[in-house]
Structures are given as C-alpha cells and as structure tokens.
Image (cartoon, grey):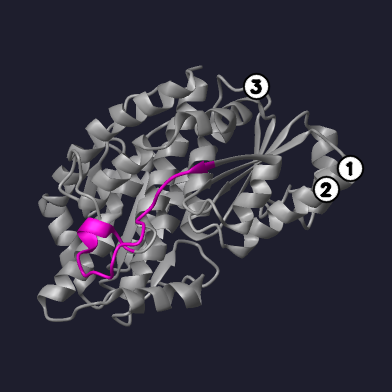
C-alpha cells in the first residue's frame, strides 16, 4: 500500500479516506452531482453500511426546511414506496416526478439488492423509452455488472476503498473490512448535499471535504485519547451486550456502528442490538447503551436513557451540546458541537460515525493485548452470515 502523503489523524484509515476522496475525478463527479441537484425524487439503494451511509447523507435533504425545491427522498423499504419492485414503482414515480434519480452506493458493486433495482429500472427505461429516470453509482469496482448497467443509463463515480491490502491485525491502519469505502462515501455524499444546498459548483464539494477533514482529524484524535473513550473500551471488553439508539439520521449512524461492533462482540459471545429493534431484549444490569442525538432533547431517546439506567445499565451519549438533557443524564458523554441554523444540513451525524468508527478497532486491539488476536477471516465470516 502506498505511503500517506499527508496526515490529519493518528488513525491511519482516516488519512487514506481523505486521499481516496480527493482522488475522485472531478469530471466524473460533475454529471452525477448535476443529476442529484436537478432530481425531484431520489431513490436510495445499497446494502448494509453502504446503504446506511447513503441514507444518512440523503436524510439531510429530506429533513431540510429551506433551500430544496420539491425533492423527495425514498428507499424501497419506505411504506410509501409505490411498488414491490423498482420496475413496479417506476410507473408511479414517472407520473409524480419530472426526474427521478436511482442513487446507489456499493463499494464492491456485487450486492444483490442494488443490482436487482438497477436491472429493473434499466428494463423499464428500455421498455417505456422514457427519459424521466437516471442512475448514479458510487463504487470501488468499475468493472462490475452493476457499474456497466448504471453507465448505460447514468453516471458511475469511482471512490477507492481499501484496495488489495494484505490481511493484517493492524486495523487502525486499514479499518475493518469496508470501513474506508463506507465512511468515505458518507463524507463525500454529505458534502455533495451541503454543496447543493449552498449552490456551489462541483469543485466546492472537494473544498468542503478538505475543510471538514481539517476539523475531523483532530476531533477523532482528541476523543480517542480521552478518558471517556478509554472507559468505553474498558466496558466493551467485559461480557456486556451493547444497545445503540437514535432517531432519524442518528438511527442510520448507529446502525453503521452496530454492524461493525457485532463482528467483534459476536466473537466474544455477546450481542449488539439497535434500540426498539424487532429482536431487542430487555437489557441486563451492566449492559451498555450508546445513544446519538444532536439536540439531546429528543424525547424517545431521553426516555431510552432513563429506562436503561433504571435497569442498572450504563449509558454513553453523543450529542451536539454538553448541556442537553440526554448528556446530563448519561454516565459518559461525547460532545460534537456544531453551530448551524435549523433546516440546514448538519455534519454532526457524519462526525458521530467517524468518532464511533474506531470503537471496534480499539476493542480488537485491546483483545490482542490480552493475547486474543482476531483475524479478519473470522470477522468476514460474521459479516457473511449476518448480511
């Protein structure tokens, strides 16, 4: 793997994510950026953490109260999605919207769900001879069948991930499995939405990325070196189940964290749950809950904290202010302050994903210090049977 040209963090994979994003070709991003800007409806597609990162970025458009004109964000899992398949839904989407963009985030380009959606939409476009649809794909695999299909009806952007790095126990340098692509895609997509909101040209996307990395690197490092993070890893090392919760965009972020955390905790015989999930049990005394809320005042999330503590659980909160109700009631807190007007895109959620991303890495390193090395093929096995 090539040497890092410049470092903004002590975490190696964060530096590589920065290089990968800045290496994206402007001419390739421009048509996708323009399609996203002009689309009246965006249908999000992907799998696992790639989908969660896409949803998190696009939710900033969906929740914005100003600056967007008639832009609707949908996923196939939404109750209001007008069909059981993309082909079925396309007729209604064509009736409702002048332009619909199927936006796909897939590092490998091999995931079944987005491939089927792209095939369905390609078939509809060819059958109906319509120009009301386009496709966009962010991927590391430019030669996949998915990339070929999208290229015929839209635009493909290459965002490098980890590449062909050899198996290693140094997860701080390479991340765990798809960390580089999934976190990189999250930041790139978030900056694209913010650039559109600010009415910037495509070059503005990369300027925002540079600006954000200059803040993000020190933010990650300061939290990793804090007593709070050390205490968090201490708790994770114990035989505890972990619960993660948030509403809206925060829920997409905790799902990103939960997927990777389970790969490590599952190996230890523990479980990781998303709050209010279909299989979420009552917590036990000593279990850990991680809650994410920008305001720290979201009533259901504050209630989860209160209930968890009554059952003698331990709560870490990540909020945008240290003086919120959730922060005050938590045992540990991480504050990621951000000043932004109501209705404008927030970076808080993306930053929370980055600050949480080293948690499974640090846990794996702690286990290694105890003599229990966790090879990546075991992590991959958990991934393959759970996603």
Q: Position of residue 328 (x, y in %)?
A: 25, 45
Gap between marks 3 and 2 measured at Cα: 26 Å
**Label 1 vs label 3, nearer the camera:** 1
Around disc 1, counting alpha carbons within 10 Å, would you say few (fewer than 14), some (14 to 19), or many (20 or more)? few
Q: Position of residue 237 (x, y in %)?
A: 20, 72
Specify the quadrant of the image occupied by residue 288.
bottom left
Q: Secondary structure at mark 1?
A: helix
Question: What residue is shown with label 1?
Answer: 128
Q: Is residue 137 magenta?
A: no
Question: What residue is shown with label 2?
Answer: 124
Q: Nearer the viewer, residue 329 or 350?
A: 350
- Tell me which residue sits at (25%, 37%) in the image: 216
Gap between marks 1 and 2 measured at Cα: 6 Å
Q: Position of residue 285 (x, y in %)?
A: 28, 73
> Start and end of the magenta stretch?
157-176
Residue reaching furthest right?
128
Q: Secondary structure at mark 3?
A: loop
- Tell me which residue sits at (26%, 51%) in the image: 13
Around disc 2, counting alpha carbons within 10 Å, would you say few (fewer than 14), some (14 to 19), or many (20 or more)? some
Residue 51, visible in the rendered structure: yes
Image side of residue 192 versus residue 10, left or right: right
Labels 1 & 2 near each other (Cβ < 8 A)? yes
Around disc 3, counting alpha carbons within 10 Å, would you say few (fewer than 14), some (14 to 19), or many (20 or more)? few
């Amino acid at each position: 793997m090539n040497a890092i040209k410049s470092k903004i963090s002590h975490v190696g994979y964060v530096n590589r994510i920065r290089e990968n994003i800045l290496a994206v070709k402007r001419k390739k991003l421009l048509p996708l950026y323009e399609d996203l800007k002009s689309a009246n409806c965006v249908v999000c597609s992907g799998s696992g953490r790639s989908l969660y990162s896409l949803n998190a970025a696009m939710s900033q458009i969906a929740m914005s109260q100003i600056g967007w004109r008639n832009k609707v964000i949908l996923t196939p899992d939404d109750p209001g999605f007008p069909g059981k398949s993309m082909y079925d839904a396309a007729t209604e989407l064509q009736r409702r919207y002048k332009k619909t963009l199927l936006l796909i985030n897939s590092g490998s380009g091999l995931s079944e769900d987005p491939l089927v959606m792209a095939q369905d939409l390609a078939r509809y476009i060819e059958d109906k001879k319509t120009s009301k649809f386009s496709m966009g794909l962010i991927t590391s695999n430019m030669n996949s069948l998915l990339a070929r299909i999208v290229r015929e009806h839209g635009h493909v952007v290459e965002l490098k991930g980890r590449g062909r790095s050899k198996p290693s126990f140094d997860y701080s340098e390479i991340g765990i499995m798809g960390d580089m692509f999934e976190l990189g895609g999250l930041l790139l997509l978030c900056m694209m939405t913010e650039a559109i909101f600010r009415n910037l040209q495509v070059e503005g996307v990369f300027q925002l990325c540079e600006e954000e990395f200059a803040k993000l690197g020190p933010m990650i490092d300061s939290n990793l070196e804090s007593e709070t993070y050390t205490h968090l890893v201490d708790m994770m090392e114990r035989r505890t189940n972990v619960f993660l919760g948030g509403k809206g965009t925060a829920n997409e972020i905790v799902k990103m964290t939960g997927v990777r955390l389970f790969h490590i905790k599952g190996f230890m015989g523990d479980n990781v749950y998303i709050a209010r999930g279909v299989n979420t049990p009552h917590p036990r005394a000593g279990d850990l809950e991680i809650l994410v809320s920008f305001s720290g005042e979201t009533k259901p999330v504050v209630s989860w904290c209160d209930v968890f503590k009554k059952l003698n659980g331990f709560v870490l909160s990540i909020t945008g202010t240290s003086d919120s109700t959730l922060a005050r009631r938590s045992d540990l807190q991480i504050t990621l302050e951000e000043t932004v007007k109501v209705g404008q895109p927030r970076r808080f959620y993306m930053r929370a994903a980055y600050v949480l991303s080293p948690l499974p890495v640090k846990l794996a390193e702690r286990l290694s210090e105890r003599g229990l090395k966790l090879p990546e093929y075991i992590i991959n096995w958990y991934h393959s049977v759970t996603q």
